[in-house]
């Protein structure tokens, strides 16, 4: 006889799950709440609610300027990573060629190798390349670490993609480039956009490379400087603005992920 | 098609154009520079010397730095494994809206700025923060417990940062678990614990190894959390590498440390992948 509870969760399981969920969410929720504090210090419970720290953060030239720098770097590096990652995913998915597994390993390697060492290496090669620490260097650096995420998401989108459509288009005399833009790209659009958003958010949050290859003027570096010096709720306010941005993008991504799964 | 043979390389061209100059070469340069001679004016002088390694591996301070970092990486990996396996099991067998919500909660922290997460932990662990004010208002403690700017606070914040990276691969592997196996085990008189130990746990191993690899590489290169929530009395490797390279101008020393970190991570990746293959021959058949 089968015991009906052979793998059904028990009450303790629900409690445990709730505990882990709380652990994952608590710091994010608290950080957001503190942004609405009316007090001058980092304290909890809050003395009262106000929007003054948002006002303060938005008036702070150092933060706003950093936000612009970060946004420029994030948009450009996400564009580069998306092109490179999509191409690599298509090459790995469509073709069997010599060195396939080496290439596969190589494009995924930036995830598992320590970013701080790559940052150090980038610092060393900037001047031989005739580059200086700044936005351009950061764009290239951030793009490399985002490529694996784009590859992973586009590969997932390609897994239920029918190549026959592409062959049909080519056989009917449509050029490869037109075939790509008219057939392939629309079908894997969800994965490409999800990859681009991931790349954007990774760049926006990057510290270990930016430390070495920018002039300390990206938003995370400036927030960190401020946090090391004096932790006031304006940092939380700026981070909350960033969080709202990330969440907006994540919510955009959600329908695409669901759409992919339901197919 | 004439282009046929070259087509994959054409598709790979943009990735190569980025990864070769901005990933492969910089890492090779770090390894090369670790054998160069240090110079206060020109930073580096071409040479082939093991002096940097002798300095790094012979100095008590640098050894402490490596020891601290490896210890924290180990502690966080173990705690994350213990927390992640039962949680991932629950997520893997949940369905519908609940599953979507749980997955979203796991992924959410990854998309929140790490500075924000560090700030959140400061709010929790500060002297006037959540933990201390709660305990003090309950009159359980008279003095605030020092958590922030100590190893304990840093470990908590790092655990929070890397836990999702442990949960996600385990959820992915446990999704493939055929629940009929558990039913069969129960049917044949196996206890829940027996079924878990002999079916769930072995199936989760690839995910556990993958997660541990990510956690290890993450902790070894984490600069933000040791700087913001840790203490200089407990130095970690990433801030020390940055300090040596940027503030001290000791490029060769920084390179030697960076190369050692690379070697540790690479060895860990290789050994754990080999171990999975050895321990789990059925994985090979699947792939």
Image (spheres, grey):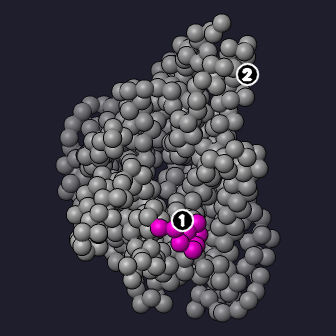
Please rate how many residues cluster around mark 2, counting C-alpha atoms within 10 Å: few if below 14, some from 14 to 19, many from 20. some
- In the image, B130: left or right of B73? left
Query: Is residue A100 found inside the magenta-colored segment of the image?
Result: yes
Residue B194: mark: 2
Residue A137 seen in the figure: no
Q: Which residue does the image show at 69% across and 88% down from the upper left?
A: B37
Q: Which residue does the image show at 20% across and 41% down from the upper left?
A: A51
List x then y, in percent, for residue A100.
Answer: 55, 69
Q: Which secondary structure type mostly characterizes the magenta part of the structure?
A: loop
Please rate how many residues cluster around mark 1, counting C-alpha atoms within 10 Å: few if below 14, some from 14 to 19, many from 20. some
The chain to which mark 1 is attached is A
Residue B137 seen in the figure: yes
Mark 1 on the same chain as mark 2: no
Q: Which residues are magenta?
A: A95-102
Local SS, label 2: helix
Given residues B276 and A141, the one toward you in this image is B276
The chain to which mark 2 is attached is B
Kindly indicate the quadrant of the structure image that contains residue A13. Answer: top right
Q: Which residue does the image show at 72% across and 15% down from the upper left?
A: B188
The residue beneath circle 1 is A104
Residue A221: mark: none
Given residues B267 and B29, the one toward you in this image is B267
Kindly indicate the quadrant of the structure image that contains residue B57. Answer: bottom right
């Amino acid at each position: 006889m089968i015991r009906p509870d052979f793998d059904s969760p028990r009450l303790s399981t629900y409690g445990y799950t709730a505990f882990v969920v709380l652990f994952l969410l608590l710091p994010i929720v608290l950080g957001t709440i503190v942004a609405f504090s009316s007090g001058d210090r980092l304290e909890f419970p809050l003395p009262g609610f106000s929007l003054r720290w948002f006002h303060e953060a938005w008036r702070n030239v150092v933060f706003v300027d950093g936000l612009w720098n970060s946004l420029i770097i994030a948009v450009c590096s996400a564009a580069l990573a998306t092109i490179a990652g999509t191409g690599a995913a298509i090459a790995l998915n469509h073709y069997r060629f010599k060195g396939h597994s080496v290439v596969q390993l190589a494009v995924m390697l930036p995830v598992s190798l320590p970013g701080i060492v790559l940052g150090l290496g980038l610092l060393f090669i900037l001047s031989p390349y005739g580059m200086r620490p700044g936005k351009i260097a950061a764009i290239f650096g951030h793009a490399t670490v985002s490529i694996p995420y784009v590859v992973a998401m586009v590969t997932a989108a390609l897994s239920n993609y029918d190549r026959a459509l592409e062959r049909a288009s080519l056989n009917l005399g449509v050029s490869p480039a037109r075939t790509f833009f008219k057939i392939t790209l629309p079908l894997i659009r969800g994965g490409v956009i999800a990859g681009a958003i991931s790349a954007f958010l990774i760049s926006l949050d990057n510290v270990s490379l930016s430390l070495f290859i920018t002039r300390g003027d990206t938003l995370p570096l400036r927030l960190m400087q401020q946090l090391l010096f004096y932790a006031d709720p304006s940092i939380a306010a700026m981070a909350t603005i960033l969080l709202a941005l990330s969440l907006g993008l994540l919510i955009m991504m959600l329908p695409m992920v669901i759409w992919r799964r339901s197919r | 098609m004439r282009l046929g043979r070259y087509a994959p390389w054409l598709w790979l061209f943009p990735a190569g154009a980025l990864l070769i100059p901005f990933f492969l070469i910089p890492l090779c340069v770090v390894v090369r520079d670790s054998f160069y001679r240090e110079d206060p004016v020109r930073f580096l002088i071409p040479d082939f010397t093991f002096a940097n390694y002798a300095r790094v591996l012979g100095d008590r301070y640098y050894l402490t730095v490596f020891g601290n970092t490896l210890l924290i990486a180990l502690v966080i990996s173990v705690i994350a494994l213990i927390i992640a396996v039962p949680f991932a099991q629950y997520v893997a067998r949940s369905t519908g809206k609940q599953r979507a919500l749980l997955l979203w909660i796991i992924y959410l922290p990854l998309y929140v700025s790490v500075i924000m997460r560090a700030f959140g932990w400061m709010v929790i662990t500060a002297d006037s923060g959540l933990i201390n004010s709660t305990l003090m208002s309950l009159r359980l403690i008279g003095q605030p417990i020092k958590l922030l700017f100590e190893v304990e606070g840093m470990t908590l914040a790092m655990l929070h940062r890397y836990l999702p990276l442990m949960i996600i691969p385990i959820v992915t592997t446990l999704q493939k678990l055929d629940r009929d196996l558990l039913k069969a085990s129960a049917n044949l008189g196996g206890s829940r614990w027996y079924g878990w130990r002999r079916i769930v746990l072995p199936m989760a191993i690839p995910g556990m190894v993958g997660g541990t690899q990510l956690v290890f590489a993450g902790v070894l290169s984490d600069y933000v959390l040791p700087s913001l929530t840790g203490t200089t009395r407990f130095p970690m490797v990433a801030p020390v590498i940055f300090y040596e390279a940027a503030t001290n101008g000791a490029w060769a020393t920084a390179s030697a440390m960076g190369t050692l970190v690379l070697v540790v991570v690479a060895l860990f990746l290789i050994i754990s992948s080999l171990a999975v293959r050895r321990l789990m021959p059925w994985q090979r058949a699947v792939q």
